[in-house]
Amino acid sequence: MESPHPDERPQKKRRFFREESSPAQLPHVRPASPSKLQDSFNSAPSLSKIPVDNVVEHEGDLAGFDANMLQAVVGELPHATLVKLKDVSGSDVQRAVNLYLDGSWSSAPSYVSPTLPHPRVPAMQQTLANALKRTDSEASIASTPDSSSSTPIAPILKQMPGRRYVGSFGVTGWATKSGSGLLKHEEEVSIERQKDMPKQKKGLKRVVNLKKVDVIVRFINSRGEEVGRLENESATWISALLDQNVCIFKGTVVYTPDRLRTGDNVFLQLRAFFLRSAFDSRKFVKPEDNREVNLFEEKESSDERDLRRRQVGLVKLFEAINLTPTRQNASTEKHKRQGLLQAAERDEDRQKPKPNSNSVPGSSPPSEEAEEGEELEQDQLDSLYKKAQSFDFNTPEMDPANTFVMDLRKYQKQALHWMVGKERDESQNDKEESMHPLWEEYAWPTQNADNQAVPIIQDQVMFYVNPYSGQLSLEFPRQEQNCLGGILADEMGLGKTIEMLSLIHTNRNEVTKSDPSIPKSLPRLPKNSAVIEPAPYTTLVVAPMSLLAQWQSEAEKASKDGTLKVMLYYGTEKAVNLQKLCSASNSLNAPNVIITSYGVVLAEYGQVAKQDGNSGSHGGIFSLDYFRIILDEAHYIKNRQSKTAKACYELSAKHRWVLTGTPIVNRLEDLFSLVRFLKVEPWANFSFWKTFITVPFESGEFIRALDVVQTVLEPLVLRRTKDMRTPSGEALVPLPPRTIDVEQITLSEDERNVYDHIYLHARSVFNANAERGTLLKSYTTIFAQILRLRQSCCHPVLTRKANLVADEEDAAIASDVANGLADDMDLDSLIERFTSEGDEDVNRYGANVLKQIQDEADAECPICSEEPMNDQAVTGCWHSACKECLVNYINHQREKGELPRCFNCREPISARDVFEVVRHNYAPDDDAPAATQTPKISLRRIGLTGSAKTQALLTHLKGIRKQDKGMKSVVFSQFTSFLDLIEPALTRDHIPFLRFDGSMSQKLRATTLTEFTTSNKPYVLLLSLRAGGVGLNLTCAKRVFMMDPWWSFAVEAQAIDRVHRMGQDAAVRVTRFVVSGSIEEKMLRIQERKKFIASSLGMMSDEEKKSQRIEDIKELLS
Amino acid sequence: MAALPKRIIKETERLSKEPVPGISAVPHDDNLRYFDVTIDGPAQSPYEGTLLPPFGGVFKLELFLPDDYPMTPPKVRFLTKIYHPNIDRLGRICLDVLKSNWSPALQIRTILLSIQALLGAPNPDDPLANDVAQQWKEDQNQAIATAKEWTEKFAKA
């Protein structure tokens, strides 16, 4: 092609040395080692003895060099050249052709060297070295296709020349110098990046440079003088490829003016060569999936930016050299490059407009849990779900294994069939090797731009590109095992847990019990425990803390005794070495199911990370390759950037399942995280996802994006909803009926006074702020007032107990309230009046009174004829009746404006003089002693047993106990401090109760739930709406009491569904207590108006929530 | 119609199982709060007929239990014409337990007994039928005679 210029070498060398003074840490760099290259250049005369690494692997002897063959290929050559080629190529003609064509054969290749040791190398190597470390450590955990190559270097890579021609293209450049004779037609120019970039060298690599990325690419004439630069358009991507050691380019001048002036156009033809190092998968950093998010980092990490530049570079390169893939995946083919570029450009744009906001560090740093992507509108979500849940009722069923003892409904058997099918997925194994869907296959060119043949390398006809990750490979990227799992997204209450358990029973590796040869190898420690061991008999279940116990008990309930070994793993028990326990050699004792929480996974992930990713020796969750992993309530990992999500991605298993009733909570990205966990290619690649889903969606192409989502979901998701009907019109799960009654509560006079007082205060605060237009500012204050109003509906004392509301939604607000109104004497005295009087000891009234009350206890109520009375109560003149009758009668008289009198003796009485009779020996089971001995009783003034609401609750509970001695009930309140006040009332009335709230430890929660479900006692379970709203199964109860309304009924409905769900075999009655003529009634109206308040589901920003609530508050206080 | 309260059911049952001598109260089939009542005029009173019950001296009344019974008293009215200072021409009765002295502890049975007692002890000082009360005060014998006459005339089976 061109002749060497040996005379110019000294100049070249000088440049080299100058550059070498910069500390280039090259020794640890593998394959296309520039240091070796330098050696070869510096000691040019002895070239023949030094393996020219970038060209050939080894030298051979000189015998049998077929010069004719060579010349037939490349054309006539001078004799000297032939000799040299012989020398260098080791008599291998093919190699010689190669050498000749890429020009590296010559001893003085002034045009070869410049690009390689370019100044960014040191920094670059640093990154690569780091990256290498990282990918290696990850390699043992993750089984992603690219990181699994833990072999030092692929053999096929060794055979590749240091660089290989892929194609050529024309570019325009412009001169930076004036003068004549600077360039000649056909002159070889070298293409180089900016020489000195001191800033970049000094600056930390991680710091993202927001200034326009330096893309200057120079071309240098054969004398080593910089002559000009490439046009920016092409320089942008060429620089990226140069910087990232993907390519080198060599140029030939196609056109140049004889006399160059600065700014003149120069046309060059560039030949692109892929560097061998670009194909080395070990060096490749795939940053985008697991990137660390730190506070000062910009939206796009430098890794991500590099990736993007590399992607764009590759796509543009292929475009420029007009190389099209010979094979690519059909599903990725459709949208393709255009989308990829679009996505990248969009990122670019996104970075640009806001350098200002970014220059203020910490002004609004993205929080770690910050999510990206736009939220879905509710109707979009709905239609998406609708598409995803076209469930065919005729899908085949499958009976579970006989070790599974529960009865499955039809649709559950269908789920089992589907899941087993997914796990076995035989078809995939039979298919011939298919290419990984993200990759594209390209053929190495056989001719150069001048239609001359380029050397062909044995067995290397094709190469492969992954445009989404920017990876290159020489090896055929095999389609990794298809995802052998999926998303079970049946709606809550359809029995996802049971379906999963049936799968665990039905599709499992048979323990080698039947095979007598294997058990002889008794459990032994794996020699090198640094690797993760397969656990072929174990399914790992990861669930939220509150559900662990439930999983365990369900698993045990569903299994024939001894057929399923279940283990709860809390991580803290360091004595347990999971790896030893679950390894294949311990098959007889390995647990079949390990249940653990997200918290444990996260904690161990942190520990493993500390040990440099040595997950094997940790002996914990990450040390095993499970047969199956199940993530329950998988929306826990909906944010792909959360640490929990990342930890879960790293768990390895053959089969991966996620269970969730809401695969998409409010963003399409929520789904990505699940897909990422499932390792569904190609969608588990965020770049790919972004390209085909996020970008179209955000740019308004909803239909297209949702269609794509649907194609993602279709094979992965099984979703049925409760209101699905079979073709014959039956409900999928016939649940017993559920009735919800709203019970109006009338506050007692004293309570009313407290309420009115707070109400007036709240309204004056509101009006004052409304006038001044400072509603949003004083949001906290006003909202605090509302909170107080709601509390006073429950129990006046609540408004005073700032310290008890700690776990409630607005603890801070609550304490504000307490402080703000501390000097409010009126309120204090009102509340005092409410609480002042305590129990009366009946004994001071003498024995005959006691006797009389005693005698009347079993009599008929004179008012309602109940026998015995409901809650005996007595007047001050000691006449007994049902409490309710008595109170009603007094109220009745009062309403008519009459002085209340005793129904019996017509003595004037007041509401205060009515006493409830409390028996202290209450024992429903032993009825014998009641007749023989006088039970101790005491009297308690009615109206002081608590608030109107607690009284109403007690009345209900007592009524229930009359009807059905064993009936269990559940009481929800959003105020745990209200639950605190209900407790003593229940104690007084000897109603057995249990408590479940967020402050309890996992073990305590578990025992509480077990006690509640298994005991025969007619327990009342007091639950905080927060802690009890999710996941729990409380089907043993039949009655639900909602003590206070929440802003959105959806939240209450969720809580109710804890009881009214699959497994419930009786009608469920729900009572919602609402104080009449109060803010609570108005809240119900708001609930009605918008059945769905987004804020309650976390779909609004804080600001939006506030203004939304202000709207509500206006209504509430109107 | 709302379900009948337990109290009314019980009272009705008891009225038929353990009837009060001289008094009967039978609910209508189509309205269990509406009772046909008969009260025999007490012995040695102007309301005791010459023919003994059931052939004479039997007064018919109607009794209705309002929705908020027993918070409010039953409504009772004589259907049989009666000459009595506390009972007017329309059959309305002036009796404290049917008004201000009502108590939910009272029942149909006790109310009817009170009415029976009222027949035995007319109280012209707290009249409802003023003309009758006047007569009763001015010429008690004549009044009693009229009462007897009316009893013979109207209070028969």
Image (cartoon, coloured by chain):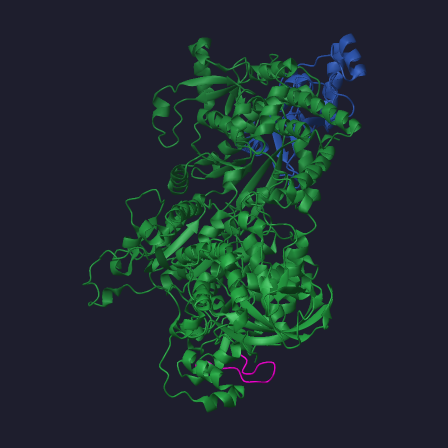
Chain colours: A green, B blue
Q: Where residue B1 sits in the image (x, y, percent)?
A: 66, 40
Query: What's the residue at 54%, 83% (across, down)?
Result: A446
Question: Considering only vertical position in the picture, is A245 above or below A457?
Answer: above
Q: Is residue A926 left or right of residue A470?
A: left
Q: Is residue A479 left or right of residue A708?
A: left
Query: What's the residue at 23%, 67% (across, down)?
Result: A514
Q: Is residue A215 visible?
A: yes
The quadrant of the image that shows the N terminus of chain A is bottom right
Q: Which residues are magenta?
A: A444-458
A450 part of magenta stretch? yes
Q: Where residue B16 sits in the image (x, y, percent)?
A: 56, 33
Q: Nearer the viewer, residue A195 or A121?
A: A195
Query: What's the residue at 61%, 24% (across, down)?
Result: A816
Q: Hey, which quadrant is residue A575 in on the image?
A: top left
A442 part of magenta stretch? no
Q: Where residue A847 sits in the image (x, y, percent)?
A: 42, 11
